[in-house]
Image (tube, rainbow, N blue to C red):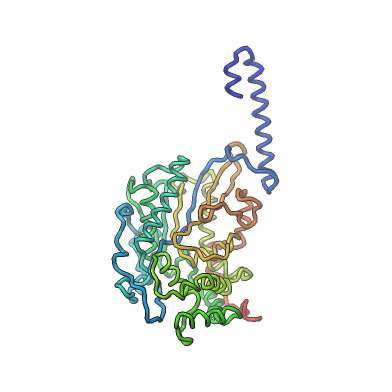
Amino acid sequence: MITRVFSVRLWAPVGVLTSLAYCLHQRRVSLAELRRADGQHPVARSLLELKMVQVVFRHGARSPLKPLPQEEQVEWHLQLLEVPPQTQFDYTVTNLTGGPKPHSPFDSQYHETRLKGGMFAGQLTNVGMQQMFALGQRLRKNYVEDIPFLSPTFNPLEVFVRSTNIYRNLESTRCLLAGLFQCQKEGSIVIHTDEASSEVLYPNYPNCQNLWKRTRDRRKAASLQPGTSEDLKKVKEGIDIGGDDEVDFLTLLDNVAAEQVHSLLSCPALHRFARVIEQRAVDTALYILPKEDRESLQMAVGPFLHILEDNLLKAADPATPPNKTRKLYLYAVHDVTLVPLLMVLGIFDHKWPPFAADLTLELYQHQESKEWFVQLYYHGEEQVPRGCRKSLCPLDKFLNAMSVYALNPEKYHTLCSRVQVTELGNGE
């Protein structure tokens, strides 16, 4: 229409008036669509501007955390640790305030378990490095190539990176950044970590006594539940593991997933049970942290959810100084983080989060109404979060739904220190 207005001079006055009327009409339509964004009419995406992206991801493929008590063991050869050249990218690790990297008690524990073949437990492999590099490439396509949102080279003024202080997560982050920025950077890459005692990027049972006490008995009872106990007995007998060996479905899944992604095979029967092992592992996790137990979910991921919300609020606040927010926030977490996080978001699909799983939260602003919206993706697929009728959700609706679970540091410490009198799941 604009082209026709400027190409026919004779009708310019009429064309301008028509154009203005049309623009006013379109503005009223778009505002009406926004007011009806509860599911009746879609928001015009052409009027949305991307303002911020947060990506929460699981590390890449690794060796098992605890080998199964079997005679036949997979050989985890040291060749699996060879770093693919394209993933090499220098980085520095600090604590949350920029000080020295904290000690990692988890890495010390993993080094106490050497697997057959020479690798330690829980080590990121070159398969996992490739997975994370591929995720970085996908993010580059989405936010550098398809949409010129991020600079093509790493810029610390645009990107904030945080990881749990576990080596496989730090290395996974390196590989993701290498894929995202093609090993190009302006300034140093800093990955921020926290002390294990105060980490909130995973459910911190040792640091939250209330959560530990609530779930302690459930952990013991999970394998004894009807259906689960029978399946566990069947699987253990099928792979020649004694009935007295303390092996649950979480340990079985850990080994199955690690072996399958590396095309390794310790026991054919173990892989024949892969589907039931995954389903029972999910059942176990949901028994330990049931969706009905709001307070346990709050203590498990409430502080991390608060961080994600705080980033959204700062980005949407015009009073926020430019140096206090970033375009991209990256968080390297674990499967035990993603399961409860997906639950509180209302998008858990009852499948165990695979290696390199990613959850992406985009923040948009409408260019005319100036209203804010969020868009959620899991594995690159659009999701409809809790409290929203469509995948593109008004920010206030999203925050209102998440406020049920988010905990600021003060509320988190108060809830964690509270004495639990009755415990959900014990028949009380």
Q: Position of residue 378 (x, y in %)?
A: 53, 56
Which quadrant of the figure contains the C terminus? Answer: bottom right
Q: Is residue 142 visible?
A: yes
User: Quarter holding the N terminus?
Assistant: top right
Q: Is residue 251 visible?
A: no
Seen at 60% across and 59% down, the residue is 403
Q: Determine whether 328 is above or below 202 in the image.
A: above
Residue in the picture at 65% in, 37% down: 30
Task: Answer with the quarter of the image where residue 14 lies.
Answer: top right
Which of 8/404 is in front? 8
Question: Is residue 71 placed above or below 400 in the rendered structure?
Answer: below
Pick the front one: 392 or 382 = 382
Taking depth in this image into account, of 318 and 308 the one nearest to the observer is: 308
Image location (x, y in percent) of residue 334: 46, 64
Up-down relation of residue 224 to residue 90 (above or below): below
Q: Is residue 385 left or right of residue 202?
A: right
Q: Residue furthest bottom?
A: 244
Coordinates of residue 97 in the picture (x, y in percent)? 39, 58
243 relative position to 189: left or right: right
As drawn, is 360 to the left or to the right of 110?
right
Number of numbered markers: 0
x, y percentage for residue 203? 50, 68
